[in-house]
Amino acid sequence: MAGAAITASALLLQCALFLRKGPELGLGAIASLAKFLTFMTNLTGIGVLIVFVSAVVGGGSRWARWASDPVVQGAMLVYALLVGLVYHFLLSRSWHPDSAWWAAAVLLHYLMPGIYLLHWTLSVPSGRTRWVHVLWWPVFPIVYVTIIMLIGPGLAGYPYPFLDVGELGWTSVLRSMVMVLTGYMSLSAAVVAVDKWRKGL
């Protein structure tokens, strides 16, 4: 319940901030919401929120079964942790937000991944993941970045500065993509390894 409340509050705050900033960027309400959904942080937060809510309310719906699958929850852990790591090491030092944006950033990049890691450690059944998931879990980020690059500078620019081809050029952007993809695969391998270790305890 704490994880669901914190994640929902952070997403609502973030969404409200995007709606408020939209007119400054020349975006209407719908376009502002679309821009909100171009950020991997927000997409990951929505996925984590679905898992948290499903854990609280239970039920046998398709969404509940999907969200309670240990493989899905392992993937969400990888996404949540990398969201925090990318923000901390690639973005936080070059971004100086006001108090509201800072609060949303802390909630989504630090607190949400931390609580979700605790949830995964204490509540998710162990031993269900396989090494093949190291290859499958990064598929979603690959699809995400492909769509973002196809959209290009639409919706008032790229969501992350390290993806800005016009500013950095393809060589730098591809280097960043490879680095982040390596992070996804490394974290995926670590989660699978820890999951197998937990089963053996």
Image: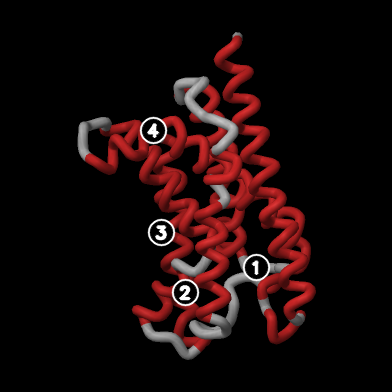
Furthest residue in direction bottom, as rendered: 26
Quadrant position of the C terminus in the picture: top right
Disc 2 on helix, strand or loop? helix
Which residue corresponds to the image point at 60% horizontal and 30% vertical from the top-left?
A: 192
The dot on residue 12 is: 3
The residue to which callout 4 is attached is: 69
Q: Which amino acid does label 4 sit on?
A: Asp
Q: Which of marks 4 and 2 is nearer the N terminus?
A: 2
Residue 111 visible in the displayed image: no
The residue closer to the viewer here, 191 or 158, is: 191
Q: For marks 1 and 3, give the CA distance.
A: 17 Å
Within-10-Å neighbours for mark 2: few <14, some 14–19, many 20+: many
The residue to which callout 2 is attached is: 35
Q: Which amino acid does label 1 sit on?
A: Pro
Disc 1 on helix, strand or loop? loop
Furthest residue in direction front, as rendered: 132
Q: Is residue 56 above or below residue 10?
A: above
Q: Which of marks 1 and 4 is nearer the N terminus?
A: 4
The residue closer to the viewer here, 24 or 128, is: 128
The residue to which callout 1 is attached is: 97
Q: For marks 3 and 2, give the CA distance.
A: 14 Å
Location of residue 79 in the rendering, given as x and y in whole percent from the top left corner: 56, 47
Q: What residue type is labelled 3?
A: Leu
Location of residue 186 in the rendering, given as x and y in whole percent from the top left corner: 70, 42
Within-10-Å neighbours for mark 3: few <14, some 14–19, many 20+: few
